[in-house]
Image (cartoon, rainbow, N blue to C red):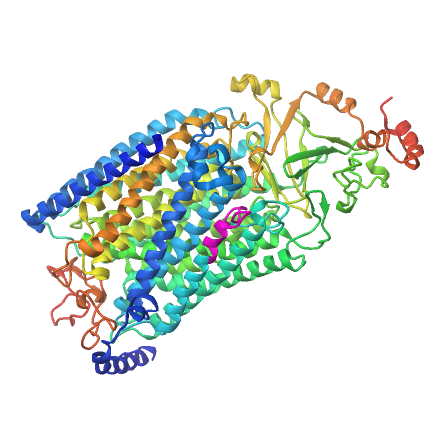
Amino acid sequence: MSSVATLSNADIQGVHDSAHHEHHHHETFVSKYIFSQDHKMIAKQFLITGMIWAMIGGLFSVLFRLQLGYPDTTFPWLENVLGHWAKGGKIHPEFYYALVTMHGTVLVFFVLTAGLSGTFANFLIPLQIGARDMASPMLNMLSYWFFFTASIIMISSLFVQTGPASGGWTIYPPLSALGDASMGSKIGMDLWLVSMAMFIVSSLLGGLNYITTILNMRTKGMSMTRMPLTIWALFFTAVLGVLSFPVLLSGAILLLFDRNLGTSFFLSDIVVAGKILPNEGGSAILFQHLFWFLGHPEVYIILLPAMGMSSEILSVNSRKPIFGYMAMVGSLFAITILAFLVWAHHMFVTGLNPFLGSVFVLLTLLIAVPSAIKVFNWLTTLWRGNIRFTPGMLFALGFVSLFISGGLTGIFLGNSSLDIHLHDTYFVVAHFHIVMGVASFFGMFAGIYHWYPKMFGRYLNNTLAYIHFWVTIIGAYLIFWPMHYEGLAGMPRRYYDFSNWESFKMFGGLNEFISLVAMIVFAVQLLFVFNYFYSMFKGRKVTTQNPWESNTLEWTTPINPGHGNWVGEIPEVHRWPYDYNKDNREFIPQTEPVGEDESKH
Amino acid sequence: MKEFFLVAIVIMIFVVIFQIAKASEYVSVLKGEEKSRKQNNKINGFLLISFLVLGLAGAWWCNDLYYGKTLFVQGSASEQGEKIDLMLYITIAVTGVIFLITQVLLFWFCFKYQEKDGRKAFFFPHNTKLELLWTTVPAIFLTILVVFGLKYWFKMTNDAPKDAALVEITGHQFAWEMRYPGKDNVFGKKNFKLYNKPSGNILGVDFEDPESWDDLHTTQMHLQVNRPVKLVINAMDVIHDVGLPHFRMKMDAVPGIPTTMWFTPKYTTEEMKVRTGNPNFVYEISCDQVCGASHFSMRGVIVVETEAEYKKWIAEQTPEFISLNKKPDAPGAADSATNKVVAQVLPK
């Protein structure tokens, strides 16, 4: 029944739009590039804002890696740049924690949530399901501008006298609630909370739009089971965001109340800086539940789009159908459900009831099953393929490798008894940077390299792309692989200096090595950013409509599609998107009707 | 000056790379895009398999370099921690096998099935048997890990044995305070509103409560070897965490919500100096939950000693009630009470 509704919907829309299309020429600069309602332009806005954020967030990590790698050295130029935060060329501890906090916040939310799913959900959903735009282009535009506002507020917090938030990206109260406990918990924390509230609004507007668009605006013949896996992944991502971000919003608002209105949601029995606080009856642990109820799904909000894009790119460039399409959809679904049921595995050592902890162990390790299915399906997709190593493909392969490496260490941490030892050590840092940080970045890069021709009608420079890939993957493993050993030695994360610790001071040489590699990797990312902007204007032009010989709908649009995507009617879909090398044909686009004598699968 | 030089060099390298990249693009256009694509394919296929081989060798080398620096060489310093070490070895074995198989397949397939003229990809959209295989096999392995993990987890989080020593540890920015319950083995009541820095009562102990009169307040933790100890963990301001890497133990200190953990130290500090070959060895308490600007320096020390040494140390301590009231500025009213208590609690 729903498919009937969809058909007529798409038909009506098609007719309406093709009649309407000719009148669309009087776009001004503002309506085209700034307050644009074209999903492709909004996607680019998200991507470029995300890239700027990534450079800022990456630079933060370079700065605090300077401290970690060279704790005894002073860098006089730092004082010129950072002023009183780096007196005498040495980063102040308070500022070190601010850098760590902002690095986490920026990369997790502003880059890998907004920059990744904001970009590709906007760009790919209408193009791949055959819609002229999102269900509500207006809300879509607002989604970006809320994100932009959030960005401005977050950036402004860098310039206040007492500095930005510095209690870690997880902003656990009471540290984050009490200005007396830390400089960063003064006005910087309020700005952080307000900025995140804006960010959540942006994310909800976007998410609702993505869900509505996918459910209602698929073109004729595009049943749910004919959607590319990218769309499935972006769909589940949006569902995760819509259901979990409001919980963080509630946590943020309650924290704002505790900070400014004298409530005691998270505060009780506190003496800080010699002052006895009146608050009684609150629970600091309650905040952690609220935070991780978003915080854990957030990991999958970051990861699922990378999985979806990698699946698509692996299939296209292996010239083979993705193996086990239904299992891939099923495992995405399973991960989505489980993502809501594992949040307390971040809290095994908070004094959580051990029985409750054991339930979370079971549910957490269950996630490994759908993850294993995905990995083996990707491997089987490669098996007996005819693989083309385009830059996008290399990053997708890198994604699989990193996802395996980082996923397996999750099995260590999800097991509560092991987590007692490994909790909040560098093992955790290594684990989540590989599986959610670098792996998702690889998914994002894969997507950028693969769909850049569709975005700008030009290619990125190949040589720069290959350098980018190889330095990044080698660097990522050099940085994060040895960190596991630091974690196994019990070395705590978020330490400014280890030299006073008999137990942890033996890793000085390794820390220096990691810092050095991190700086090189950061420099190569700048090379990528240069490539991105240079190629927008000077890149090799795309001359064929379908450069990767791909089946999906976005490659049936003109090389530089206008607002509305297809010039004539929206194409009709007759098959799933993965008919590669079927019946001796290299590829069969989704728009091609099923032939009489075609084999079934 | 050095910095400018460095930046200049980096920019130079960028320019060179960019020029090479631009030139190679012209070359590929001249050569024909199809041909240069195939050449790139070969190069990357070779690089991928090399990455696997070098990567595995590198992982081996890394293990060689750093395994000795982890805590597993010296073994767990607590009985409970042995289970954690065992669990770690089981997990490394299981995940190690999966890691090797999947990474080798990934890069090997990339190399073996790279694009070649005349090769046709095999249309292989699904196979129920295979998919069931790799749903059930990981599920079985995970069941094993969950069973072992939870068995140890419940053992460790169960109630401490009845004869366990009792120590209270309280975190505040940026130090740890210990409290021993004294002869009656019961801590006197506390109330954070009784916090009084000038009088020295920073833990907010309620000295109206007679059970507090024999409690000791120390800044170092002393433990008796081979005797289970139960820690009662508190925080005064923000969340801290009692991290004991050598004992493989960790528990948050949350203001308003006391937590507990227990373990049995196996080696004295002196024994550990021999075991680790480090004459400066100390058991350290690291704060493992970010707690403010000096989080990294929130260090505590535990001394594990023999029964005789431990008893001697305890005997040398003065109860807090007495040491605080001994101060010349202590109110006179408390004095008479103090004298009575001194008679009761002081040894001998």
Q: Count the labels in the image.
A: 0
Can you give x and y, in whole percent of width and height, for residue B246 in the image? 55, 29
Residue plotted at (76% across, 42% down) = B195
Determine which quarter of the picture holds residue B179: top right
Determine which quarter of the picture holds residue A14: bottom left
**Residue A43 appears in the figure:** yes
Can you give x and y, in whole percent of width and height, for residue A537 in the image? 20, 56
Q: Start and end of the magenta stretch? A: A153-169
In the drawing, does residue A398 fall left or right of residue A486?
Answer: left
For the C terminus of chain A, which image quadrant?
A: bottom left
Determine which quarter of the picture holds residue A216: bottom left
Most foreground residue, A54 or A325: A54
Most foreground residue, B209 or A564: A564
For the N terminus of chain A, which image quadrant?
A: bottom left
**Residue A379 appears in the figure:** no
In the drawing, does residue A26 fall left or right of residue B228?
Answer: left
Can you give x and y, in whole percent of width and height, for residue B89 in the image? 45, 33
Can you give x and y, in whole percent of width and height, for residue A243 in the image? 47, 64
Q: From the viewer's perspective, is residue A4 above or below residue B310?
A: below
Q: From the viewer's perspective, is residue B225 above or below residue B295?
A: above
Residue A310 painted magenta = no
In the drawing, does residue A196 fall left or right of residue B112?
Answer: right
Most foreground residue, A68 or A286: A68
Residue plotted at (18% across, 44% down) = A463
Residue plotted at (83% across, 33% down) = B321
Most foreground residue, A81 or B56: A81
